[in-house]
Image (cartoon, rainbow, N blue to C red):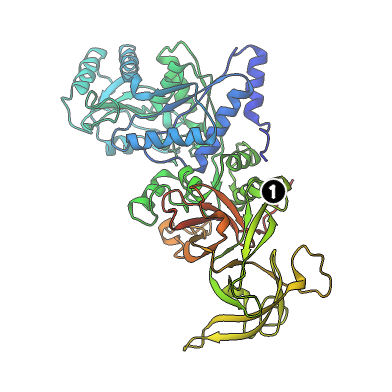
Amino acid sequence: MENKPSSNFLKNIVNEDLKSGNVDHIITRFPPEPNGYLHIGHAKSIILNFELADEFKGKTNLRFDDTNPVKEDTEYVESIKEDVLWLGYEWDNLFFASDYFEEMYNRAVLLIKKGMAYVCDSTAEEIRKMRGSLIEVGQKSPYRDRSAEENLILFERMRKGEFKDGQKVLRAKIDMASPNINMRDPVLYRIAHATHHNTGDKWCIYPMYDFAHPLEDAIEGVTHSICTMEFEDHRPLYDWVIRECEMEEIPHQYEFARLNMTNTVMSKRKLKQLVDEHVVDGWDDPRMPTISGLRRRGYTPEAIRSFAREIGVAKADSVVDSKMLEFFIREDLKLKAPRTMAVLEPLKVVITNYPEDQVEMLEAEINSENPEMGTRQIPFSREIYIEQDDFMENPPAKYFRLFPGNEVRLKNAYFIKCNNIVKDENGKVIELHCTYDLETKSGSGFTGRKVKGTIHWVDAAQAVPAEFRLYEPLILDQDEDDESSFIEHINPQSLEIVHGFVEPNIKGSKPQEKFQFFRHGYFNVDPISSKQEKLVFNRIVPLKSSFQLTK
Ligand code: ATP
Ligand code: MG
């Protein structure tokens, strides 16, 4: 079950633009920088851009905003493509900003010729100091009045590699007294002697985001260029670049609030730090909020899309409860995932009055909420495993599971009663001796007496050993005014590994197959660690949550 795309202020804008004739078609783009793996925040942007164009029969480009050679890599390019496709979106065009470097260079030359850009020899530090502040105007660079001729020669020499990194930059000549600091002669080009993943060593000058991005949009004929709120103050510069570079197509920038989520860091820089410092086991660690991590954990594209549609698109900043994402995976898997029994921390039970060599097959539904999924056969014999914490020697009041003298229902099977306990030399309970009552067979209509507890189990002889990986949030939430680093808030208990058994029915489970394990939650077969001889399951989410969707 998936949510339908919902309305938002951007759809209204596009609608108006089409009605008024401002535009006659729609082109959006998703413009990741290939300097890390995509995360759930990017998913919001992907879904927004693709669905916006789709609703108005437009097109969406996947464009790699690859203008910083130092941090970018083809590994990231490939992972981003995979993630976008997995989310269910096919781009109309695949573009690389680096393919436009020549054109960008020519536009910069045009600005120089028009007297609207100059080569500045100030250091980064000097430029920062001279930029002024919100209450102080900036100071003009001593190089601001170089002639166009001189600037053209210097800019060409920059391109040829005659200067070192940081020795010179190209700046726009706009207004050092502008109330908008972004307009105080921003840097357009910098020198970086670095090998680029796409253009190799062809270039040693690279355009800055504020110069490159509007040009990329215009070159591609993007009509609605959607970005996050922190770029709102850059919009005048965006429009300036489009206008002064005399671009034929005129894109417009619109901003929306980025996704923030509780218990989650959502910046590629921080996620990369977790990977580099081996806090997690790679970008696709199931605890990561990356698309690849969520996929490996067991999230489905349907759940992520429903989540993105539910949170909607607005301009006001907010923090979404990460339990909402969990809500949507439960919704998605509720009717889809087969339900079976798994014992995560086993305790052996011998049913002393059950015939020694007998094995019977019990029938049960595969998904009690979806009868169309049919039934399965579960073996039952004299020895079974139950969950260690479904037994207590000295239970508190209201404990309805197994304890000496008490009777419970084995899910899909019989009532059993605990008669004896076997302990090891340390006093730890290692085995229970129980008796069963043939009359109480599940589905037989037995009404003779009632029991208060139902517990799950697996047949000991046929059970399939499995590893279960149980997750808690990777990041513990911090107070708003707490300025300590997120690294200090890493949850030391974010992963617990236990070894138990699953029903023989799911013995041959394939990577990424998903199940609901009775009482434990939804699980995914880990695509990397799971082997036919040793299944490994990631818990996607437990079954229950206090989270409610408020409508
Ligand atoms: P990060 O801050 O995580 O490094 P970024 O914005 O630098 O992200 P880009 O690759 O530049 O990453 O982003 C590609 C697109 O995804 C941009 O349009 C950006 O606005 C959008 N985006 C990034 N993070 C979020 C988020 N948390 N919520 C919504 N959109 C986001
Ligand atoms: Mg970025």
Q: Is mark 1 within 8 Å of ligand 1?
A: no
In this picture, is 363 found above or below 356?
above
Q: Residue furthest right?
A: 447
Query: Image quadrant for the C terminus?
Result: top right
Q: Nearer the viewer, residue 521 or 202?
A: 521
The percent coordinates of residue 532 (x first, y second) are: 44, 53
Q: In this orientation, which residue lies closer to the viewer: 382 or 303?
A: 382
> What amino acid does circle 1 point to?
Gly
Q: Nearer the viewer, residue 101 or 339?
A: 339
Tell me if 140 is positioned left or right of 444 in this view. left
Residue 277 percent across, percent down from the top left: 33, 55
**Relative to the observer, which residue lies in front, 238 or 436?**
436
Q: Which residue is mark 1?
A: 374
Circle count: 1
- Compared across the picture, whether 160 is left or right of 311 comes to left
Residue under the point 56% across and 49% down: 514
* Any part of residue 34 in sight: no
> Where is residue 282 drawn, in percent x and y?
38, 50
Mark 1 Cα within 10 Å, few/some/many (few <14, many 20+)?
A: few
Residue lying furthest left in this view?
A: 162
Q: Which residue shows up at 67% across the image and 25% down it?
A: 12
**Secondary element at tag 1:** loop
Q: Quadrant of residue 183?
A: top left
Give the left or right position of residue 267, taking residue 44 as reference: left
Residue 269 in the image: above or below residue 120:
below
Image quarter for ligand 2: top left
Q: In the image, residue 531 lies at what x, y percent?
A: 43, 53
Residue 296 shows in this picture: yes
Q: Quadrant of the N terminus?
A: top right
At x 66% / y 20%, what residue is drawn? 15
